[in-house]
Image (cartoon, rainbow, N blue to C red):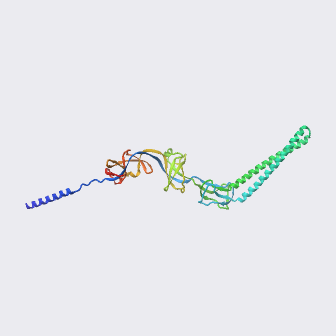
Amino acid sequence: MKKFLVLLLMVSILFTLSACSRAEEPVVEERARAVKIQEINEGENPVTLSYIGTVSSKDILKYSFKSTGKLGRVFVEKGDKVKKGDKLAQLDMQDLNFQLTASKSRLDTAGLNVKKAKDALNYDKDLFDKMDNLYKEGSISKDKYDQIKLKRDTSMTSYNQAKFQYEAAKTDYEQKLSLVEDATIHASQDGSIVDMTFEEGELVPQGNPVIVVRSKGQIVNVGMAQRDLNKIDIGTKVAVDVDGQRCMGTVTNIAEAPDESTRTYNAEVTVEDKSFRLGSIAKLEFNIGKERGIWIPISVIMSDGEDYVYIVQEDRAFKRIIELGKLYEDRVMVKGVNPGELLVISGMKNLNDGSKINIGE
């Protein structure tokens, strides 16, 4: 009996201690998470097509001489940048200048011969006109008249021959002058020297390239899929990005037929106000119009296998599964949320579905 009373007393003490412990246990309140929100609205943003292209020169110009000759001087070196009108190369001018001088002398002589022949013709024509009147009056014989007429006709022939010789001399002089002028190659546009195929003193055949220049203008070649051809036109604006260097470009040509190996259609995008290394890889964004919808910042989108955002209802944030659409810069068009709803734009990484929130400014 005594043992039973002791056991009962111990149980009573333990029960009392347990009850006190439960009475002193504090109530844990749910902590509100700090977030920032914004109201969802419909908006309009550009729609783009993304492609990868290769930087190329707009023009590769190969300069040559119109006549065969010895290369006298080269005014540039490989890698030099040149401006329109700059001298590039020149033939040996000694022989050409000698030929030009001789041709000019022949032209001057032919000009003097024409003047003499014309003076003689004018004299003989005047004389014939006088003799013709006298002959009609019977004052001179027919034999005298025929002599004067023959002299006039001979002067006419001599004058025509002198004119023919003058025209031939003039043509020869103009040809020699053209050879002298063409003996110096000038840059037809701004660019950079890519190659020089002859050295000073070497014989340069007519029409053989001597200087190769890459024009300053650049293009990006890109293979377009057939499905996208109807979305772009000549004049379509394009954002060009080469290793973080950005500029704008314009579609200036679209191939009519596809490449046989890739089955894509080559489009040329002319680059504006930039110069990239040839062969560089460029990221292209073709601006093909605008589309209206709900566009939200990419940074607010979470993913656990499905893309979702947090929408605020009263003082809590709830997960909302969304469907991603087109992308523009740092925003993406989505489906699954509605205009007027409140979107969590900061603090969403600390949330769970249904978390209590505290909205900050």
Asked whether the viewer can see residue 9, the reply is yes
The outermost residue toward the left is 1
Residue 136 falls in image quadrant: top right
Q: In this view, does 25 lie above or below 229?
A: below
How many labels, in total?
0
Point out residue 177 in the picture as x, y percentages from the top left corner: 72, 54
Q: Please tell me which residue lies in front, 148 or 63.
A: 148
Q: Residue at x 86, y 42 (%)?
A: 128
Q: In which quarter of the image is the N terminus?
A: bottom left
Q: Which residue is drawn at 79% across and 53% down?
A: 109
What is the residue that sits farthest to the top in this orientation? 137
Q: Which of 240 and 23 is in front in this view?
A: 23
Residue 267 in view: no
Describe residue 141's horizontal placement relative to residue 162 as left or right: right
- Name which residue lies at 41% across and 51% down: 298
Residue 43 percent across, percent down from the top left: 43, 45
Rendered location of residue 201, percent (x, y): 67, 62
Q: Position of residue 320 (x, y in %)?
A: 35, 48
Q: Is residue 170 left or right of residue 285?
A: right
Q: Which of 94 and 330 is in front in this view?
A: 330
